[in-house]
Amino acid sequence: MAALTRLGVRVTQAVRAPTVAAGAVASQRRFLNLHEYQCKHLLREAGCNVQQFEVASTPEEAAAVTKRMGVKENVVKAMVLAGGRGKGTFSNGFQGGVHVLDSDPAAIQKLATNMLGFNLVTKQTPPEGVPVNKLMVAESLDIDHETYFAIVLDRESNGAVMVGSPEGGVDIEEVAESNPDAIFKEVIDISVGVTDEQAARMAKNLQFTEGDQGKVAAEQFKKLYELFVKVDAVQVEINPFANTKDGRVVCFDAKIGFDDNASFRQKDIFAQEDTAESDPREVEAAALGLNYVGMDGNIGCLVNGAGLAMGTMDIIKLYGGEPANFLDCGGGVTPEGVASAFNIITKDPKVKAILVNIFGGIVNCATVANGIVAACKETSLKLPLVVRLEGTNVEEAREILANSGLPIISAIDLDDAAQKAVATL
């Protein structure tokens, strides 16, 4: 997404919310991220040209795929969601998450044995790496010319834009900085789609000029746009989009970004999400309708509203504390939601206190107070709990907390709450 912004295209998707305290990144929802093989499946179903590929979960499956494919050479890729796989290192010391080798089933099986079941560490993974549970075994093709192609939503154009460059297979940001004239854009009229003229012009700009390659490339651009619309994408990026030495035009690597607001009508796609690399607390929170991001501090936070949550973390930092998480329970605060939030927060062994900061605008503070009391009893909460409530029926809510018989520390305002939470440590 950042690369496309550098190309002068403002991608219409809030990939992440603004940076918050302690360098944490807060997310109002978890954005779908598919593996390369899943994106290739979507491309193949849309009639786009991709090389032969299959997925293997065991070394035996990898060998069987190679034998079944019957090609001269294979490329084997570790299926993780992080970049930099080719230069990565596995937890067993094996080097490289991408390998090209002759299609020898025995050699492929041996390779897979060194990759599957181990963590792969790259520049984009946590220090411990991420587990490799699947490999993509694909046909290796000799590329003659690599280009870059993408379709993205652009705010300034009020719609989709095709972006292409004859310099593909590399970091497109570097191309944009070193040779901006090599970047070509075509604004797409959403009521018309990609026209034949636009597709042909992009094919020419990307230097698909030999034989019928220009025509094939133009057809591929139109099919990629059809896929873009069909799956409610905000980005379809092919890098490289290339022609081979035997004259084929192929989509070699694909990244697709989806509009999460369309998840209700793209259920089959969103059901493919792989959460194996995600923080299990984030996955659990998402399933419960909570927005959670773990951090490195020791004061757990439960807040309603993303802005208030970020402000809460900032003021904890101001008074010398360290927030342990971002947790936004949304506008509707229920006893069940509070109990679920407490369960998730207390699963972090670093948490030594919890600060609840709720603004009762639509929600009734008395209802929230009853929910907090019920949740404390249900979860047998042992940690110090500081609660700041403000808004509708706040006086009644404070009485409920005071008369609960529980060691709940009530705070008058946010400064008071943060200071009291830090003082409990």
Image (cartoon, grey):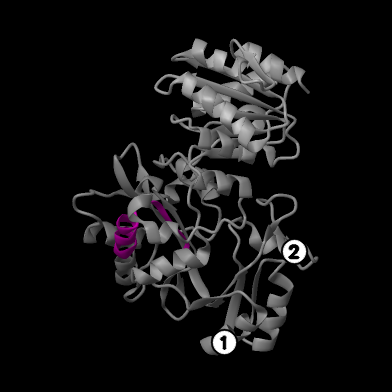
Residue 72, label in figure: 1
Mark 2 vs mark 1: which is more N-terminal?
A: 1
Label 2: how many residues lie within 10 Å, few (<14), some (14-19) or many (20+)? many
Indicate the secondary structure of the residue bearing disc 2.
Answer: strand
Q: Provide the residue span drawn in magenta.
A: 222-241
- Tell me which corner region of the image, top left, top right, bottom left or bottom right, holds residue 9: top left
Near-viewer residue (166 or 31): 31
Query: How many numbered marks, from 0 up?
Result: 2
Which x, y percent locates residue 337? 52, 36
Horizontally, is 184 left or right of 200 in the view?
A: right
| Residue in the picture at 23% in, 49% down | 190
Residue 227 visible, this angle: yes
Judging by the rendered image, the residue that carries numbered circle 2 is: 90
Horizontally, is 282 left or right of 263 in the view?
A: right
Q: In this view, does 4 lie above or below 352?
A: below
Mark 1 residue type? Lys
